[in-house]
Image: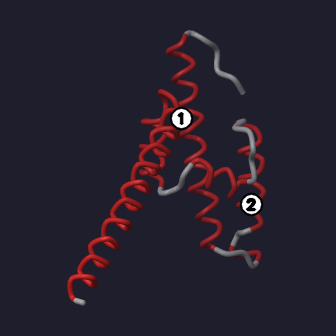
Amino acid sequence: MAKYLAQIIVMGVQVVGRAFARALRQEFAASRAAADARGRAGHRSAAASNLSGLSLQEAQQILNVSKLSPEEVQKNYEHLFKVNDKSVGGSFYLQSKVVRAKERLDEELRIQAQEDREKGRTPHT
């Protein structure tokens, strides 16, 4: 009886171990694919995300911009900053999120402009 119980436990541990190893390999592959998709600027962009505490996607969602254009970022920033001003009943927390999102997008625009200069192209706006 104890022998069968030990075999069942060992078999269960093996199954869980294989599943964990497979999930880990899938996660590494997904991470590698995401890093490749970010391209060469991925390192700079990731560093900017770490410094600001916001990812590029979060910043775009906060300011409601789909395409990175300085004009659209500035327009949406000004609107959201005014709407969330504490003197008009807004939230200081949301206003600070808007400021951080703009800082993050400005940094991304700076990174893109720097890459364009390195490639000898003019910046796209």
Residue 90, x across and y down, in percent: 72, 75
Please state if 81 lies on the left or on the right of 96 as rendered.
Answer: right
Q: Residue at x 24, y 90 (%)?
A: 1
Mark 2 closeness class: few <14, some 14–19, many ≥20 residues within 10 Å: some
Identify the disc placed on residue 38: 1
Calculate the distance from the C-alpha at mark 2 to the C-alpha at mark 1.
28 Å
Q: Which residue is mark 2?
A: 80
Of tags 2 and 1, the one toward the viewer is 1
Q: Secondary structure at mark 1?
A: helix
How many discs mark residues in the rendered view? Answer: 2
Q: Is residue 95 above or below residue 32?
A: below
Q: Residue at x 77, y 75 (%)?
A: 88
Please state if 56 lies on the left or on the right of 15 as rendered.
Answer: right
Q: Quadrant of residue 95?
A: bottom right
Q: Is residue 4 above or below residue 117?
A: below
The three-letter code of the residue at mark 1 reads: Arg
Q: Secondary structure at mark 2?
A: helix
Q: Quadrant of residue 12?
A: bottom left
Q: Quadrant of residue 6?
A: bottom left
Please state if 1 lies on the left or on the right of 30 as rendered.
Answer: left
Residue extending furthest top? 120
Residue 61, x across and y down, in percent: 69, 55
Residue 79, x across and y down, in percent: 78, 57
Q: Is residue 53 above or below residue 66?
A: below
Q: Residue at x 29, y 78 (%)?
A: 9
Q: Residue at x 54, y 16 (%)?
A: 117
The three-letter code of the residue at mark 2 reads: Leu
Identify the disc placed on residue 85: none
Q: Quadrant of the C terminus?
A: top right
